[in-house]
Image: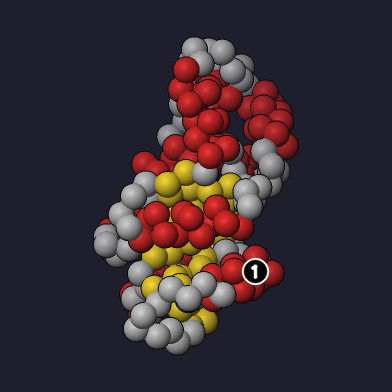
Amino acid sequence: MSESAHTSGEKGILVVDDHPIVRQGLKMLIDQEPDLAVCAEAEGAAGALRAAEQSEPDAAIVDLSLKDGDGLELLKDMRVRSPNLPVLVLSWRDESFAERALRAGAMGYVSKKEEPERVLDGIRAVLAGRLYVSQTLASDLITQFVKRPDAADGSAVRSLSDRELEVFELLGKGIPTSRIAKVLHISVKTVESHRGRIKRKLNLANATELVMHAVQWVQSQDGG
C-alpha cells in the first residue's frame, strides 16, 4: 500500500489494482485533474481495506481481479467497513460481473475497454452519489435484460451465486479443488458442495463436463 498527500480542495481517490502499470496510469490520469488526486494505492484486498481506513479517501477505484482475494468480496467488505465510501469498479470483466459488482456495493462500473474520460466521468458520478455505468456497458446490460433467460449460454452462469462463480472461475483456470479451498479460505468439502450445485445449475453430467465448461467460459472472458 502506498499513500500520497492531497490538498483540501481535491477529492482523494484510492486506487486498487494488482498491476503496477495500471495503477501508475490511473494515477497520472487522475492527478492531472485539478479537483482530484490519488491519495493511496493498493494491489490487494487487505491493503485496500487498510488504505480505506487510514487514508480516508473520498472514493475508490477497484479492479475485480486481485492478488490476495476476490474483488466482489472486497466490495462487500468495504460496504461494511467503509459504508460511506463510493466505489467505482474498473475491470475487463463482462456485464454479468457488472451486475454482481453493483449488488455487492459498487456505485459504478467501467470497462477497461472504455476511453480514459469515462473513468473520470465515473469517478465524478459516484462522488456525487450517482450510479454510473459506461455507455457501452449500459447497452450490454439492457440487451441482457430483454433477452429470454435461456437465449444465451451465459444466462445459466449468471444464475450462480457469487461464491459459486468464484469456484467456477478458478476451476476454469485449472486450479484443483484443494487449492481453491485455500484461495477462498473454505474447506475442501465446501468446495465440493459448490461444485455439485454448479453442475446442477448448469445441467452438467459429471466433473469432466464441469471443468470443460468452466475452461470454455474463462476463455470467453476478455481477461482480468
Looking at the image, how many numbered discs can be counted on the residues? Answer: 1
* Quadrant in which residue 18 is drawn: bottom right
Residues 41 and 27: in front is: 27
Q: Quadrant of residue 212?
A: top right
Estimate the x, y position of residue 81 in percent, counting from the top left. 29, 64
At x 45% / y 59%, what residue is drawn? 123
Q: SS at mark 1? A: helix
Which residue is at the far front? 34
Crowd class of label 1 (few under 14; some 14 to 19; many from 20; radius 10 Å): few
- Does residue 142 lie above or below 90 as drawn? above
Q: Is residue 175 above or below residue 39?
A: above
**Residue 41 image position (x, y, % from top left):** 52, 74
Residue at left offset 39%, top offset 65%? 59
Residue 61 appears left or right of 126: right
Residue 68 or 133: which is nearer the viewer? 133
Q: Which residue is mark 1?
A: 25
Which color scheme is applied?
A: secondary structure
The one of 1 and 171 positioned closer to us in this rendering: 1
* Residue 125 position (above or below residue 58): above
Residue sitting nearer the eye, 97 or 111: 111
Residue 101 in view in this figure: yes
Q: Does 37 appear above or below 163?
A: below
Q: From the top left corner, tell me how far across and down residue 142 is, in percent.
A: 48, 26
> In this rendering, does residue 197 appear at all?
no
Question: In screen coordinates, is 201 left or right of 171?
Answer: left
Expressed as whole percent of the image width and height from the top left, the position of residue 213 reads: 67, 27
Q: Residue at x 38, y 50 (%)?
A: 107
Q: What amino acid type should be assigned to the residue bearing mark 1?
A: Gly
